[in-house]
Image: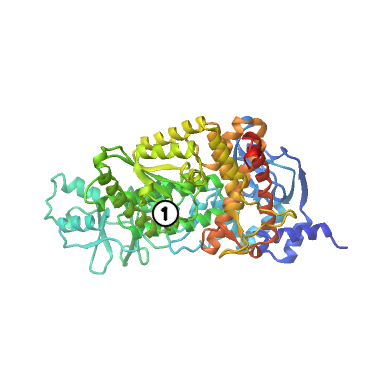
């Protein structure tokens, strides 16, 4: 007799990894042993610090939140939607739950027993690789790319999953700085300085490493006068060196550096000191190889002195972003990391641009990023939106001062373009005199927008009021922020017009719940996920933040979090808005990476039925948040 329930479960599971890897008969066998769990909103599926179950879960319908903490101190870590797995990693390593899983709405969840799935972990290489990337997402250092950008082809057992660092290959420098046994210290010091390095490997006539000189050796032994610059490298080099083969793993590298109390490892052709040197690995390289630590990458960015290298890092960042999405890292974590690195890239370009200027600026200035980057929500490379604010100067000096900063801005925007940030078609960039002004002129501009609002000023406000200081004097950015909130307090009409703008955004769905697509132009028949979905949520969060005078909160997700605290009666709606925005921003980013564009315009015929359903679920809060704006600001009379 046919088991129709099992077949329905099979049809569902085969859409999602790792089940899509399995053979039809294997998947059907698993489906027969799955338990269907119905949970009401607020029900716990498992609780933090409690023993883990002998099963893991996949969401069939609804949404399950993963929370860290207890009772009112709980913090939302991530949302599991249709097709998302949870509880798998902890089931395998057999530890107490580190988070609680709570139904955010009525949900149907499939429970998959450990004894049913564990054989596939051990026997199926592709399932094994899926788990490697999934587990790495939760490890302290989970960067799983090799030097060539290919995913590590390793397998793991149940026990090995507890220590994934042993499986990661290391990325080393393939063109080490070298010198011969006959070289003088002065020449080596010049060579190290020229190449902005921190070492030189001493090699013999066969190119085998026999010693190493580091910048600390030069400071301790030469700069102190113990050895003259005319000395040979053999006088101060550390010898013998520690060597390894290129198959060195992260764990082995960490142990070797600690065990030998050294800062560099030499990579040779066969791993012995008697073979040819092919690379070098430093403590710094080891940290950079982890890739997911913003502070490490930022330090690396600050060392770079060429735009081409910054462009390379920005491209690598896209690979890292793709890995984060693949591994389902929480959205807030992704936004934080990418924003920090983007800010560091912008700051470094400003520093390099200042070095090209004939002189340093005579007055203080602040470089602001606007729009999505100002909200710290820019994951993909989109158009530049930025501005410069400089200190007030006497009227007779204003033109000269502005000219200086326009020249600087030209170099900055060109540099940003070089590393991948396109020029803004509307020229909302600091290189435009309109967006490069003194603090007093900026204050007047903001006040004009709010006291005599027009369609243009409303549009500009939605971009410029989401600004973020990136470089220079932060007090000027703070002053502008004060002007904005002071103006809002004095002009209810301004907030009302912003509200009208949010209500007039085109709807994502038609009367019969079909997607509304663009009717003409180059994007004809595509769905505009930015204008029809994301912007309403962004605009509403900004308007209500201004309404409540919430200073220093620019990010849309953070705004909804704060609003939920301020309005408990609307907390569920704000929560839904945040949840929808998380899904939309990830969806758009995946589309952008897939099609190598901004991800804004989506061809619906490329989406699966499940993807379309996920999108439609995100549209539910849009009408509700628009209704909040309509009532709060009495907008019917203005429309």
In the depicted view, which residue is nearer to us: 506 or 21? 506
**Residue 231 sits in quarter:** bottom left
Q: Taking 22 as reference, is 178 left or right?
A: left
Query: Can residue 266 be seen in the rendering of this structure?
Result: no
Residue 471 position (above or below residue 266): above
Q: Taking 110 as reference, is 371 left or right?
A: left
User: For the view shown, which residue lies furthest in the bottom direction?
Assistant: 206
In the depicted view, which residue is nearer to us: 91 or 309? 309
Label 1 SS = loop
Q: Which residue is at a point 27% across and 42% down the rendered structure image?
A: 398
In the depicted view, which residue is nearer to us: 449 or 278? 449
Identify the residue position indicated by label 1 in the image: 427
Q: Which residue is at a point 30% across and 51% down the rendered structure image?
A: 408
Residue 32 position (above or below residue 579): below
Q: Quadrant of the N terminus?
A: bottom right
Q: Quadrant of the C terminus?
A: top right
Neighbourhood count class around disc 1 (C-alpha, 10 Å): few under 14, some 14–19, many 20 upward: some
**Residue 73 sits in quarter:** top right
Estimate the x, y position of residue 631 in percent, counting from the top left. Answer: 66, 35
Image color mode: rainbow
Estimate the x, y position of residue 495 in percent, counting from the top left. Answer: 55, 37
Estimate the x, y position of residue 337 in percent, counting from the top left. Answer: 47, 47
Query: Can residue 316 be seen in the rendering of this structure?
Result: yes
User: For the view shown, which residue lies furthest in the right direction?
Assistant: 1
Estimate the x, y position of residue 58 in percent, counting from the top left. Answer: 69, 51
Instruction: Give the number of callouts.
Output: 1
Q: Taking 90 as reference, is 362 left or right?
A: left
């Amino acid at each position: 007799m046919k088991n129709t329930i099992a077949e329905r479960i099979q049809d569902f599971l085969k859409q999602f990894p790792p089940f899509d890897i399995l053979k039809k008969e294997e998947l059907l066998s698993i489906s027969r042993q799955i338990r269907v769990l119905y949970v009401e909103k607020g029900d716990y599926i498992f609780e933090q610090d409690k023993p883990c179950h002998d099963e893991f879960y996949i969401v069939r319908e609804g949404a399950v939140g993963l929370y860290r903490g207890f009772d009112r101190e709980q913090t939302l870590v991530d949302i599991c939607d249709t097709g998302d797995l949870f509880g798998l990693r902890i089931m395998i390593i057999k530890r107490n739950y580190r988070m609680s899983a709570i139904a955010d709405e009525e949900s149907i969840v499939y429970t998959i027993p450990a004894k049913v799935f564990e054989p596939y972990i051990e026997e199926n290489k592709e399932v094994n690789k899926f788990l490697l990337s999934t587990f790495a997402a939760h490890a302290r250092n989970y960067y799983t790319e090799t030097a060539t950008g290919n995913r590590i082809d390793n397998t793991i057992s149940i026990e090995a999953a507890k220590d994934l660092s042993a499986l990661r290959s290391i990325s080393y420098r393939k063109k080490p700085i070298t010198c011969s046994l006959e070289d003088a210290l002065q020449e080596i010091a010049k060579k190290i300085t020229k190449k902005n390095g921190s070492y030189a490997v001493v090699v013999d006539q066969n190119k085998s490493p026999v010693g190493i000189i580091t910048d600390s050796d030069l400071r301790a032994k030469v700069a102190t006068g113990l050895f003259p610059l005319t000395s040979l490298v053999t006088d101060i080099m550390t010898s013998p060196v520690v060597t390894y083969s290129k198959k060195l793993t992260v764990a082995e590298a960490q142990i070797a550096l600690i065990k030998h109390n050294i800062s560099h490892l030499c990579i040779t052709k066969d791993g012995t000191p008697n073979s040819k040197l092919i690379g070098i690995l430093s403590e710094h390289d080891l940290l950079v190889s982890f890739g997911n630590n913003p502070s490490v990458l930022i330090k690396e960015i600050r060392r770079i002195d060429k735009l081409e290298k910054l462009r390379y890092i920005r491209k690598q960042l896209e690979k890292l972003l793709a890995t984060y999405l693949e591994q389902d890292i929480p959205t807030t974590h992704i936004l934080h990391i990418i924003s920090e690195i983007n800010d560091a890239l912008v700051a470094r370009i400003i520093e390099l641009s200042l070095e090209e200027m004939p002189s340093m600026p005579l007055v203080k200035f602040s470089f602001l990023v606007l729009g999505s980057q100002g909200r710290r929500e820019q994951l993909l490379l989109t158009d530049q939106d930025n501005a410069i604010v400089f200190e007030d100067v006497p009227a007779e000096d204003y033109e000269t001062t502005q000219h200086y900063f326009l020249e600087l801005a030209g170099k900055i925007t060109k540099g940003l373009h070089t590393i991948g940030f396109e020029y803004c078609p509307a020229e909302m960039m600091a290189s435009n005199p309109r967006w490069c002004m003194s603090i007093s002129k900026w204050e007047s501009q903001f006040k004009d927008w709010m006291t005599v609002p027009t369609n243009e000023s409303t549009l500009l406000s939605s971009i410029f009021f989401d600004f973020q200081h990136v470089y220079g004097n932060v007090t000027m950015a703070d002053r502008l922020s004060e002007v904005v909130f002071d103006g809002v307090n004095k002009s209810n009409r301004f907030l009302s017009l912003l509200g009208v703008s949010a209500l007039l955004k085109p709807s994502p769905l038609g009367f019969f719940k079909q997607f509304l697509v663009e009717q003409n132009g180059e994007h004809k028949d595509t769905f505009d996920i930015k204008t029809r979905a994301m912007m309403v949520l962004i605009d509403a969060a900004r308007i209500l933040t201004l309404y409540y005078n919430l200073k220093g909160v620019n990010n849309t997700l953070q705004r909804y979090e704060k609003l939920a605290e301020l309005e408990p009666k609307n907390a569920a709606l704000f929560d839904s808005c945040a949840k929808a925005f998380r899904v939309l921003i990830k969806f758009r980013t995946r589309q952008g990476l897939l099609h190598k564009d901004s991800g804004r315009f989506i061809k619906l015929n490329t989406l699966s039925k499940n993807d379309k359903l996920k999108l439609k679920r995100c549209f539910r809060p849009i009408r509700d948040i628009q209704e909040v704006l309509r009532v709060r600001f009495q907008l019917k009379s203005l429309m």
